[in-house]
Image: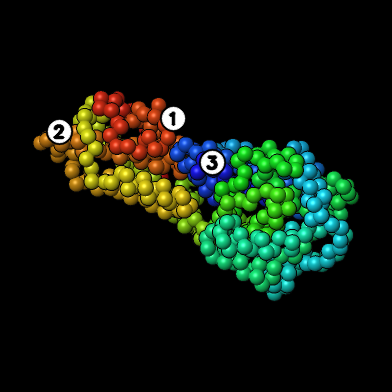
Amino acid sequence: MNKFYVTTPIYYVNSQPHVGHAYTTIAADVLARYYRMIGTETFFATGTDEHGAKIEEKALEEKKDPQAFTDEVAAKFELAWDHLNISHDRFIRTTEEGHMKAVQNALQQMYDNGDIYLGKYEGLYCRGCEQYKSEKDLVEGKCPDHKVEPEIISEDTYMFKMSKYQDELLKRIESDEFEINPVERKNEIVQFYKQEGLKDISFSRKNVKWGIPLPWDAEHTAYVWSDAFLNYLTILNWTGEKGSAPSMWPANVQLMSKDILRVHATIWPAMLLSLGLELPKSLFIHGFFTIDGEKMSKSLGNGIDPIDLVSEYGSDAARYLILSQFHFGNDGDIKKDEFVAKYNADLANGIGNLVSRVLGMTEKYFDNKVPAGKYSAEFAVADFWDKYDAHFSDLKLYENIGHILDLVKFCDGYVDLHKPWALAKTDKDKLAEVLYNLLELIRHLSYAILPYLPETAESIWQKLSITDEKQKTLAELKETGLLKAGTTLEKGEPLFLRK
């Protein structure tokens, strides 16, 4: 792979950033950091979706101009990602002039192709989803996500000929040319295509002013999805001109939760076919999660503010606690009461204690210098990295956390087995070998945790005096025996203080 382009959804600014937004964004960040580490040209995109009726209404509720309202909320997302040490290459807002102009150019292309036409649309419309619904989508007559009855809306609108692309898209999804993971999500979409099929959809709103005016009819504004989806291109400085495509396109992985899968597997790829552009390589869909067994809601007040989590645990630990809750791709439950226990077990008593113990013994027995030695521990480093890389290829982010913790457990067991404090009295050469092995495994550990715990990785490099090596690619750093005898170590402060 010579390039890697990963996207999060752009988050709708009708709500503040919460742990659900953070979950997807941290996952994308972990992937981006891994691909940078292995030397792949990488671009990581995120941002905010700021147009539409729902935003206009929310701004009016708060007695604010829509632009001022979106400026305020977008800034909160940027602040949250800064606190979580998110390494996005660009944060896009759909109210940016360049994005809006590119959307107009793209829609003009689609109109000129004959894929957009003036019509009349009548259907059930959920304002919360900003989507039209079929009767099959409803549960007891209500939107299952927002628990409200959709409105019946009838209006003049410009329609997109999405039905035109039904057969081509189904073929690409079934063949995995356009891959949807996990497989149950692919099956869900294939079933939708076969049972309901793609229908032409409304692509403009005549009575919504907070949006991008259509270039050929300024009385209409672009329907929010047709505006928002194009961010994945405009963030790469795409101008919407015919025959153009950014060098980083197509996206390798687009991450999202399952509530927006259907629109990403229907409207979005159909738009790309209309524009003559490649489809994303894959969509990866993670599940919903609850907080202490309850759905997140304002009335329950059970949301988790990512900035509050960082304030309590620090950036790395907050990232870890969010991402290590359950398998990536599954539904799951976050138990706030277990955060402290997990923090102490995995970070303070796990990674942190291991590094402190080994550096402490090196300080005590070898004057704080790497002892002379050759790697000889019964831990197959090459196999460890093979499995680590395979997990990333398969987006098994949760499984890799367990894989990393297995390395920590091996090191703890190695200390208990060889008892360096006893060897110090009986066999100094063996002691040197044991501590060299442990220091070398900690070096490997530091690179393995880098995508998840970037600040902690940097701290370990500082302690091992290997900060210069961070410029190398992972392929160079996977070799064993790279720690140089005689290097002065810096034990410093503990990586994680117990709670």
Q: Are marks 2 and 3 in contact (CB under 8 Å)?
A: no
Q: Is residue 177 left or right of residue 130?
A: left
Cα–Cα gap, marks 2 and 1? 33 Å
* Label 1 secondary element: helix
Determine the secondary structure under disc 3: strand
> Percent position (x, y) of residue 377?
23, 42
Which residue is disc 2 drawn over? 429
Q: Which residue is identified by label 1?
A: 471
Q: Residue at x 21, y 32 (%)?
A: 373
Residue 168 x, y percent position in the rendering: 66, 61
Kindly report which numbered mark, 2 or 1, lies closer to the viewer in this rendering. 1
Q: In which quadrant is the C terminus drawn?
A: top left
Which residue is painted at 61% across and 65% down in the image? 189
Residue furthest out toward the bottom: 140
At which x and y percent is residue 366? 21, 28
Q: Amino acid at mark 1?
A: Gln
Question: Mark 2 touching mark 1, by CB under 8 A?
Answer: no
Q: Secondary structure at mark 2?
A: helix
